[in-house]
Image (spheres, rainbow, N blue to C red):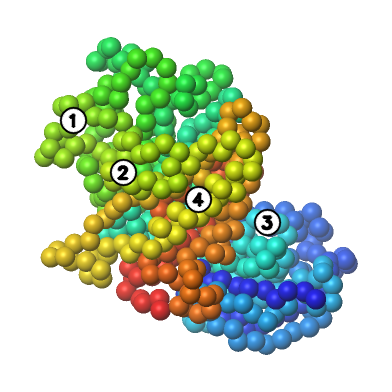
Amino acid sequence: MSAPITVRNLAAQPLTIKLVERYEAPNSRDFFPSGGFSTLTSNFTGLLGNNSTSRSVSDKAESFTKQDVDVRMEPFTTHPTDIKTTERSPTELLRLTFQGDGGGKWRIDTPTPSAASQTLVPLTPDPKHDYTAIYLPASHFLAIYESTDLQCWMKELTDATPLSALSIAGTHNSPTHHTALPSVRCQAVSPRDQLNNGVRFFDIRVQPTSPDDPNAESLLLVHGVFPISLTGPKKFRPLLTAILDFLRQNPTETLILSLKREGTGNATDQQLSTILKDHYTNPQEWWTQPHIPTLGEARGKIVLVRRFALADRLKGEWDGKGWGINAENWAYNTPDCTYGDVRVQDFCEVLETENIDKKIEFCCDHFERAASIICPVPGVTTDATNPVPAGPLYLNFLSASNFWKVGCWPDKIAAKLNPAVTAFLCEKHDIGDKGSNGPSEAVPGDGGVGVVVCDWVGKDGDWDLVRSIVGMNSRLLLREKGVGWR
């Protein structure tokens, strides 16, 4: 007997399942759109937020059963249903039609043609909302998000939102997409591609090339003691230019830039701090104040998170409070450490493949810590008399590696960890211990995940992990609009 499907509404609007239809397995020509099976599969390669309206069942196909239902799903609730995934055959398709409170309708067929997310097909013209779903076949679980334009997703949030309140996708050793040693390369695509697809946190490691020359500004991009490319040195300045070009073209966005000194040679953190201050940063393009800004303060700018010590002259910046958001020295290989303005999970020494599960557990534990935070929203949770601190910034590193073991190189770990984390966010994040039915499922808090620092996102066009992270801003967005989600 087939299992029933469970549906989770991770959008900020109520949705109601109104119609259940079942179709025979696709074994006839009439079942496919024009072009046959290859057209069908290619139509479903779009990710969350695309504009595809392709169908997995052609208009000529007829369902063998229809059932009117009325399963209402409030925002951010999970609903086990009695709707079986199959009735006649394990290869049949289940079609669910959803209706919004405003009258719009959408549908989706399960199981979806691939593990990639699928856009719900709108059945009414010019719908006010677009939705996308991720289907987890192992658990017969369907998670629904509101579709988002990843290139400018921050525009929907108010200027008063602290960056620490947001769920932000980031990348670890962000520019390491070049041909390099397999333990050095951590990314599949360029930083600009990452920005275009919603990434808003970069982890950068640099090495001053002439630390004894106070007028030298050159910084090499490195990962540990290695250059990030086997085809020649790569420098920080062109990367910075690409970032600033993106922000000029997308002024509603910001980028949190974590900088750390690595590499060989005799350079010091203090020298790096003066190089950055004297040759790179300016108040028009950078946020270097030593506290977490609001989104309004940060829009169009780079927010500096420093993982380096300051030169003495910079310790007196900003009325003696220092320079940059302080992330100077959290504990190495930590599952949970609070230091300065950050709280970090950075368990990175996965020495055996068996330890990948342990890493996944640490990542998920940190998601739940971040979920319990209620961010200060002026007029809602704080005021000038009783301010709520806007920190710390939760950093959750999904990255890990072991140079000496092929199965523990960054790409191998990401191939296991990224799908597991995506599934956790869809199915289990922010459920708590209160059960899985109704609005009471959520733990107190905004249900965010903080900054999630990933390896190998965007490989083969797969941005579902980023989409899942950005989707966790829905509850905060709803609260900012003054609508109680409960």
- Foreground label between 3 and 1: 1
Q: Nearer the viewer, residue 154 or 76?
A: 76
Gap between marks 1 and 2, in whole Å? 19 Å
Amino acid type, callout 1: Leu
Mark 2 vs 4: CB contact within 8 A: no
Q: Residues within 10 Å of mark 1 (few under 14, many from 20)?
A: some
Of the numbered discs 1 and 2, the one sitting upstream in the chain is 1
Residue 155 versus residue 366: which sits nearer the camera? 366
Q: Which residue is mark 3?
A: 115
Q: Residue at x 62, y 37 (%)?
A: 352
Mark 1 = which residue?
314
Badge 3 or badge 1: first in the primary sequence: 3
Is the N terminus in the top left, top right, bottom left or bottom right quadrant? bottom right
Which of pointers 1 and 4 indicates the residue nearer the eye? 4
Label 4: which residue? 362
Tell me which numbered mark, 3 or 4, is placed earlier along the sequence: 3
> Which residue is nearer to you in this view: 414 or 188?
414
